Image (cartoon, rainbow, N blue to C red):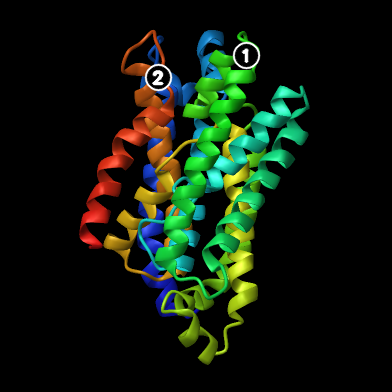
Amino acid sequence: MYRGDLQRMLPPLIVLLGMGLLSLALAVSIGSVPIPPGEFWAVVTGGGSELHRTLIIELRLPRAAAAFATGGLLGVAGALMQVLLRNPLADPYVLGLSGGAAVGALTAMLFGLGVTAVSGSAFAGAMVSVVLVFGLAHGTGSWTPTRLLLTGVVVAAGWGAVITFMLALSPSEQIPGMLYWLMGDMAYARSPWPAVTVLVVACVLMLPFGRSLNVLARGPLQAAALGVSVRPMTWTVYAVASLLTAVAVTTAGAIGFVGLVVPHMLRLVLGNDQRLILPASALGGGILLVLSDTLARTLLAPEQLPVGVITAMLGVPTFLYLLYRSR
């Protein structure tokens, strides 16, 4: 990366990083027991009361970190899918990756399998969805981004029908928890470290391919003419997006529209350089989901809304606006 590119990319990333830290601080400070800034700083520096340390370190901070990591995973997955399909309407939720991952995870949960098996099943479901979408869109000829997007929407609807069928056959005592999980709920998020680790590793691995992704965004023919191995790159992007989606689904359930809204908004502000958009999407997705989760648990307190409700309220108007613009 050239020095001029680095000087251009660092300021917006520093701003997003600062906003991310502020969103985390806001998330751990707001709740049924408000924590003043002074007390929050005391806990950060190793002091503070026992109650506040318990609230921050054991309850609120892990949830906020899990929300940040999940939003980052979905943001990067959405950015990769939009580059591959050259369509701002693409994201893991719309293309059926989230639905496939949800079916795989729910199947493992119904059989009483452990967390590792649930994660593996979610990844397998996402990959099955990728193969279905890609194979059905390809047919006997070549696929186009529009055809792939429409196929993904249909496959996503099919996964929705399978999920409904599974819910109808599930024991009644499991249904409320499954419904909340399907709508996206951070209340049951476990340790954030697996999601954080996958997010960091994926960003580090994909950043060297930033220039190739920039070329691929112009079309496969031009990318091939400029020396990009289009088919391996395509499947690599699909596999990485599927892995990110699977980890996000197993962490917080099927949360929609983060991968749609964040990359598109950042692209309008920062341009279309994937070397900047990918890390910016990780930070922007984390910020959006942390703030959405904070709103979900405080808007109707003491009742908590699923965070997927908040992201859908933001994502549906954005999707319709993008669909109108793409006519």
> Which secondary structure lies at badge 2?
loop
Q: Residue at (43%, 67%) from the top-left corner?
A: 145
Foreground mark, 1 or 2?
Answer: 1
Task: Please tell me which of labels 1 and 2 falls first in the chain.
Answer: 1
Q: In which quarter of the image is residue 135?
A: bottom right
Residue 180 in the image: x percent, y percent? 50, 21
Quadrant of the drawing holding the C terminus: bottom left
Q: Quadrant of residue 112?
A: top right
Q: Residue at (57%, 58%) from the top-left corner?
A: 203
Q: Residue furthest front?
A: 140
**Residue in the foreground of this view, choosing between 139 and 183:** 139
Q: Mark 1 points at which residue?
A: 174
> Which secondary structure lies at badge 1?
loop
Can residue 62 be seen in this snapshot? no
Residue 87 in the image: x percent, y percent? 38, 64
Q: 308 above or below 262?
A: above
Amino acid type, mark 1? Gln
How far apart marks 1 and 2 lie (CA) works out to: 18 Å
Number of numbered discs on residues:
2
Q: 327 above or below 170?
A: below
Amino acid type, mark 2? Leu
Q: Mark 2 points at which residue?
A: 305
301 displayed left or right of 53: left
Q: Would you call the spot at circle 1 few (<14 residues within 10 Å), some (14-19), or many (20 or more)?
A: few
